[in-house]
Amino acid sequence: MSIQVTVWNENRWKESTKDMYQVYPRGIHGRLREIFEAAGYSVKVALLDDPEQGLSREVLEHTDVLVYWSHIAQHEVPDETAERIAERVNRGMGFIPLHSAHMSKPFVRLMGTTCTLRWRESDDEELMWTACAGHPITRGIPPCVRFAPEEMYGEYFDIPSPDETVFISWFTGGEVFRSGVCYRRGRGRIFYFQPGHETYPTYYIPEIERILVNAVAWAAQGDTEDETRVCRHTAAALETMPVCRDMRMPENEIGREV
Amino acid sequence: MSIQVTVWNENRWKESTKDMYQVYPRGIHGRLREIFEAAGYSVKVALLDDPEQGLSREVLEHTDVLVYWSHIAQHEVPDETAERIAERVNRGMGFIPLHSAHMSKPFVRLMGTTCTLRWRESDDEELMWTACAGHPITRGIPPCVRFAPEEMYGEYFDIPSPDETVFISWFTGGEVFRSGVCYRRGRGRIFYFQPGHETYPTYYIPEIERILVNAVAWAAQGDTEDETRVCRHTAAALETMPVCRDMRMPENEIGREV
Amino acid sequence: MSIQVTVWNENRWKESTKDMYQVYPRGIHGRLREIFEAAGYSVKVALLDDPEQGLSREVLEHTDVLVYWSHIAQHEVPDETAERIAERVNRGMGFIPLHSAHMSKPFVRLMGTTCTLRWRESDDEELMWTACAGHPITRGIPPCVRFAPEEMYGEYFDIPSPDETVFISWFTGGEVFRSGVCYRRGRGRIFYFQPGHETYPTYYIPEIERILVNAVAWAAQGDTEDETRVCRHTAAALETMPVCRDMRMPENEIGREV
Amino acid sequence: MSIQVTVWNENRWKESTKDMYQVYPRGIHGRLREIFEAAGYSVKVALLDDPEQGLSREVLEHTDVLVYWSHIAQHEVPDETAERIAERVNRGMGFIPLHSAHMSKPFVRLMGTTCTLRWRESDDEELMWTACAGHPITRGIPPCVRFAPEEMYGEYFDIPSPDETVFISWFTGGEVFRSGVCYRRGRGRIFYFQPGHETYPTYYIPEIERILVNAVAWAAQGDTEDETRVCRHTAAALETMPVCRDMRMPENEIGREV
């Protein structure tokens, strides 16, 4: 069965900049849908203005990976929705916040830090270097992915120490940034990816598309657990845990048992 | 100047168990105050029933390390207070949640996971092994600290992969548990420490006291930053960052500059 | 194409203990071959007494994952062979040292620590707990795998902080041990797995087999690189790196370039 | 007692470049000695041409932190000396390899990877950003340390995932580099620091000096252990480990014991 991707977009844009729809006629979400359907994934699109922001419990239960783009309406996502996403990630859903979604409620909730950074919207050039050899997300990607224009994001990026730092980027103004970072929370996998300002055609770059496709495959390995985890009062494991048996033996053990 | 420790205790107890005050006549907080004052730290005690739960912005600003014990009243701590603690940790305050405080709002907020575990209150015996050589928290501690009684806490402990796993414990019923784990969030340091059930005299054991004293010294190194971190729009670093100069040189550089 | 596994066994045993061949009539290597062939992998067996210890450059080039069992003949493996293995791991080969192979030259070479531990050969009982949720190596494995007999391995296990601690084990004598740990070195993946003393039928336990099969699949994702990595003198990336282009555009760029 | 620093320099230079002694009249080692003595450390200088390369067992036993600069004579350090250094680090000595010492035998031995990178000697400008908030090594250091000239070092830097990535640097040619990384090996602490090409006056820059002084203080916390660690056959911990006692109690325990 193919990977079930939900692409979420707040679908707002800043009126003082070029219209996102000139670059992405079907919205960033439309472009992401094309990318993932071409990769053979099943894609559902959800928008902020949908009922329950398009991220009801039922939608999340049937999502393997949530790809999430947000920018200026972070506050319009209710705390309950952010909590629902974070809880579903802990039970195994992959989560890929893109670009300005570093300030999204669910990402901040999962990180426990402020997730702030330095930025500059100035048609910058970016060189994105692979900093982690052999990572599945970098499969088929050259050691350096160079593209323009993009929005500068710079350190200090206030995130926890990543489980894996996959990409580090260079910008013309002297800045560096950990532009691709992996985390695990419970059974779920998170990949934050910096490229993707709404008025730049970044998501038409083949290397960027490849990274997104790789990232969904990586994040989909989370192994959903049905039950919400709770503190469990248990009897002693020695009293309850079954002994795993030598497969050749009948019920009478030859090996020593306790 | 000595380390400023705030010891926080919800100061509630379960009526169906032995009275905590028989074991700790001045409360767990009173015992912790004795330990830290004997170590030369300055100690302030705060309780859940104090105004603002004893953890106002002013109190937190003057706290280097918050040692936090909670059990059955996690929900009585307002979200705003938990958020205030998490924000202060990110700006440099150390945080040491003890025992059942693994389910405290501030710890869960900083971790981004459920922090659940298996448990059994049964006068167990615990062997706590050092799993990280040369860590400051283990200074002067034997390779194995063995004590009884304690409450069993067992894996799977739903926390993020620790930056450092300092202690792993053994319990008689067949369980293991990562009983001492370190994290960094922003400028702050966190050490979760499992021993400390309210009806057991764990905090009178010298080795346990030593660990607590070491942990406060470790967590106090967070380096407070005054300003809450925000996303910064910046000009190019090349335009604004000063060049660090060879100290021998006058204002005219001999070395090559860009 | 199926995963190419090379199973390596020093094929020595201690004469004062029960003959390993009573438990494993075809040797531990024969049993491991059965497990991996049943999983659909291609298996080659190599032994210490083969030419070049069965681990020539050519064999390693055609190996996706090296599963390595050694105990009393660590010193009989030449430094050059250990170096060849470590170099091949860095270029993408998976490496799974089992049980007493924690003291093998290649594992010690890849870790940079002593890899020592406490041990006791006493028909112990082991409870192996999953300490990392949702990890591919734990797919289909219960939260606790309990089996006997096994040899006790206990902390302090002198290894670097693992990238992932997958299993932590309990033994009857009060010991705990990080019994399944993952590392990355260059493009390669390493999984050290403690169970597998040569006179116990551990490798006939279905849950243990499942872990070994999962581990090979995980370790095979290393992505071999053909060239040995060297320090590279390079011209400026801005002079040599191609610009990744918007796929819709002809050679004339619409987007801004540098 | 002050921290005992041993500064080691291979004391060779490439004849085709400017004489290092014009920049460092007393050698890089002489300059480093000045820095550390000004900080109140005790400093011993050792050179490659000294007996046993100046790094006998006795010298290492009395060293808290080894600061190590090497470039073109890595191969002249015998394997035994490199092994002695690595073993002493595991027993608690701090180790600070500088600049081209990323290819030194002891650093490569401790890492288990190739430690290769991209480089260009071209009077580059470097902007070194702090990527880890509140780290002791960054105490008193601005968020960005900008200086020139320096030699470009660029990713992919083939090192294991650092325990902490403290600095990430920018170079004019489009490159980035993890220029300050921390590791633990056994009881010892390692800090690799990239700045310090022999013909640039980098070690006269106050911010760079401050980092070196901070790094020695951090690396000195390793807590030397006298005995070389070996695999230990042990009786059951339950039979041998003493019970840690409630300090208020006489030899007769009130609490439950096993």
Image (cartoon, coloured by chain):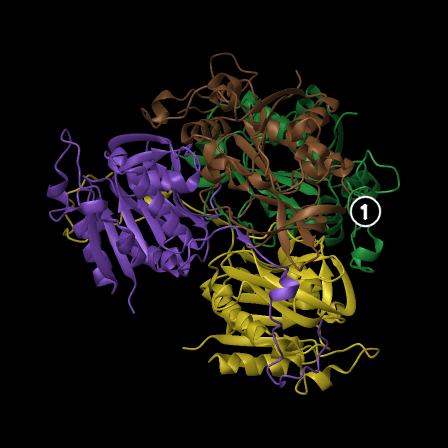
Chain colours: A yellow, B green, C purple, D brown
Q: Nearer the viewer, residue D19 or B117?
A: D19
Residue at x 32%, y 58% (from the top left corner): C64
Task: Specify the quadrant of the image occupied by residue A103.
Answer: bottom right
Instruction: Tell me which amino acid carries mark 1.
Output: Val
Query: Residue D104: where, in percent of width, then height?
Result: 51, 37
Q: Nearer the viewer, residue C131 or D9?
A: D9
Identify the image quadrant of the N terminus of chain C.
bottom left
Residue at x 79%, y 25% (from the top left corner): B1
Task: Specify the quadrant of the image occupied by residue D47.
Answer: top right
Q: Secondary structure at mark 1?
A: loop
Left/right of residue D103 with respect to residue B233 in the rendered view: left
Identify the image quadrant of the C terminus of chain C.
bottom right
The answer to whether residue D256 is above or below residue C205 is above
The answer to whether residue A206 is above or below residue B30 is below
Task: Kindly identify which residue carries mark 1.
Answer: B243
Task: Specify the quadrant of the image occupied by residue A14.
Answer: bottom right
Residue that lies at the very extreme toward the front in this rendered image: D16
Residue A57 shows up from this direction: no
Residue that lies at the very extreme toward the right in this rendered image: B251
Query: Residue A237: where, in percent of width, then height?
Result: 37, 44
Query: Residue D202: where, in percent of width, then height?
Result: 72, 39
Please rate how many residues cluster around mark 1, counting C-alpha atoms within 10 Å: few if below 14, some from 14 to 19, many from 20: some
- Tell me which chain the residue with mark 1 is part of: B
Left/right of residue D2 with respect to residue C91 in the rendered view: right
Residue B17 shows up from this direction: yes
